[in-house]
Image: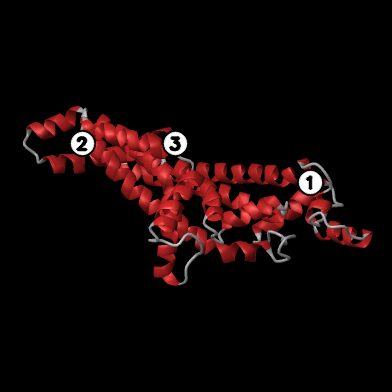
Amino acid sequence: MASFLLRRIAGILATLIATSFAIFGSVHLAPGDPATFLLGGRSASPAAVAAIKAQYHLNDPFLVQYVKWAGGVVTGDFGRSAQFRQDVAGLIGARLPTTLWLVGYAGLLILIGGLALGALAALRPGVVDRLVLIGTGVATATPAFVAAIGLISLFSIQLGWFPAFGNGAGPGDRIVHLTLPAAALALTFVGLLARVTRAAMLEELGREHVEVARSRGIPGTTVVRQHVLRNALGPITTVTGTVVAGLLVSASIVETAFGLSGVGQLLVSSVTVKDFPVVQAVSLLVVLAFVSANLLVDVVHPLIDPRLSHAKGGTS
């Protein structure tokens, strides 16, 4: 396991280096002068343009610029926002709690709804199974912005149950304000997790050891809990990495739709005005979160299914 972790960490570092190079290089691939973008299209004197180029090291060769930027990233210095005239790290830090609340709330809804619907479909073949499949199919095909519009129209405008905009003040008020955004963010992934759970449980229900447990008179709930659901957690855990990536990407759409001052909304506004330091920093953090989630899945997976631990031990 130790050698496996070292290989995975080395792979993550290589991925981050390659991704950071690609993200930083995107500035130079954009048409036009980066200094013009950083000035926001405003007319400026030659002295102001020279100052911008000196501040962002635009006169240096590309590799020198990248090394300086990457060195700053390692120490937590992501540069200075051209839009807000503030340090990028401070901008992200101020907005990160809102995004973490939103993603955590949505993740809880995905876990509860996906597992419950998937198990219900697997254990109730026939009408219930078909209804769950239809519902999860619709949920999976519904984009986050469409879900946001529908939820705002129904639960905020017509029924008035939840606010449509804002972060809320305090934990209780924040949960109320984030309920609709979290539901819009979670909808697609509830359908995905439900379908994965259903398929995994159906596969386990057909295995010989489950039939043997039933023939011995073991209660059905015990069989499902100890022999079916436990063994089905492997593929369910594997899909977590995809869910994390999807949540982080979709959060930008949901935060914009509900007027949340999170990292996703910051990314959207920065892309609009071509605030490259912020775009680079947020993009790199999204990649870091994704690879970290996949590493966590790789560590937890053998604990759920010891057979994977033995297989990895034999190949290392």
Q: Looking at the image, which is closer to me, 103 or 162?
A: 162
Question: Which residue appears at 83% of the width and 52% of the height?
Answer: 36
Name the amino acid, label 3: Ala
Q: First in sequence, mark 1 or 2: give its number.
A: 1
Mark nearer the N terminus (3 vs 1): 1
Q: Residue farthest to the left?
A: 217
Separation of residues labelled 3 and 1 (CA atoms): 42 Å
Q: How is the image coloured?
A: secondary structure
Between 204 and 52, the residue placed more toward the observer is 52
Residue lying at 83% horizontally and 44% vertically, measured from the top left: 32
**Residue 93 visible in the current orientation:** yes
Residue 63's disc number: 1
Residue picked out by circle 3: 141
* Residue 178 in the figure: left or right of residue 261: left
In the image, 128 versus 315, the foreground residue is 128
The mark found on residue 123 in the picture is 2
Q: Residue at x 47, y 50 (%)?
A: 148
Q: What kind of residue is marked 1?
A: Leu
For the N terminus, the image quarter is: top left
Q: Secondary structure at mark 2?
A: helix
